[in-house]
Image (cartoon, helix red, strand yellow):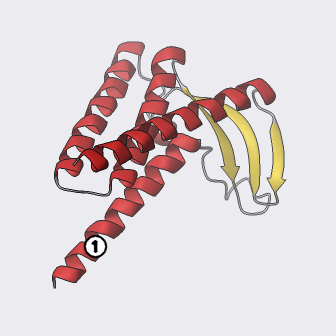
Amino acid sequence: MAVLRGRFLVATVSAACVDLAVKSAVITAVATGARHEVLPFVDIVRHTNAGIAFGLFQELGDFPRLFLHVSALVLAGVFAVLFLRRGANALAVGLVTGGAIGNSVERLVFGGVTDFVSVHWFGSESLRWPAFNMADVFITVGAAALVVDLLTARCSRG
């Protein structure tokens, strides 16, 4: 169990620190609203998202938004404890938790998160995914790894 906790802690702290460091670099290097093409289908942009996923609930007042953000952080903690007790993949749980912490710290300190990766279909404005950040990547990859682990565990049990 100590090894599991250690892996979880390293993954959590690493994900949160990488996320916050990259966001800080983007804030320093990229002007708000600027767009820099990295690949024909990926741009680096700088956008502040005061809401939650995909910018939902940006129009809420400060207190309801704060309540949502704190609730999300508490749920991430509960999620981590429950999954780790069941022997889930500590790296995957750590990525999800670290991503949640990275976004929550930025929301609580600055009132929103910095999104900076914009993926689109070769320049199309109508086929553009909402901008996202490293925390979103960590959460998505960690959650996908947990789903794969759950599915492979079920398949192996028959």
Question: Badge 1 is on which residue?
Answer: 151
Q: Residue 84: horizontal and vertical position, in percent? A: 23, 49
Q: Is the residue marked by circle 1 packed among few (<14), some (14-19), or many (20+) residues within 10 Å?
A: few
The reply, left or right, for residue 146 in relation to residue 56 is left
| Image: 32 above or below 83 | above
Secondary-structure class at tag 1: helix
Q: Quadrant of residue 64?
A: top left
Specify whether 121 is left or right of 101.
right
Q: Is residue 31 visible?
A: no
Q: Quadrant of residue 154?
A: bottom left
Residue 146 picture location, percent across and down? 33, 60
Kind of residue sitting beneath label 1: Leu
Number of numbered discs on residues? 1
- Residue 148 in view here: yes
Left or right: 50 as drawn, with respect to 122: left
Please tell me which residue is depicted at 29% across the width and 76% down the height of the picture.
Answer: 152
Residue 24 % position (x, y): 67, 26
Query: Is 146 placed above or below 19 here?
Result: below
From the top left corner, tell me how far across and down residue 128 is, in percent. Answer: 66, 54
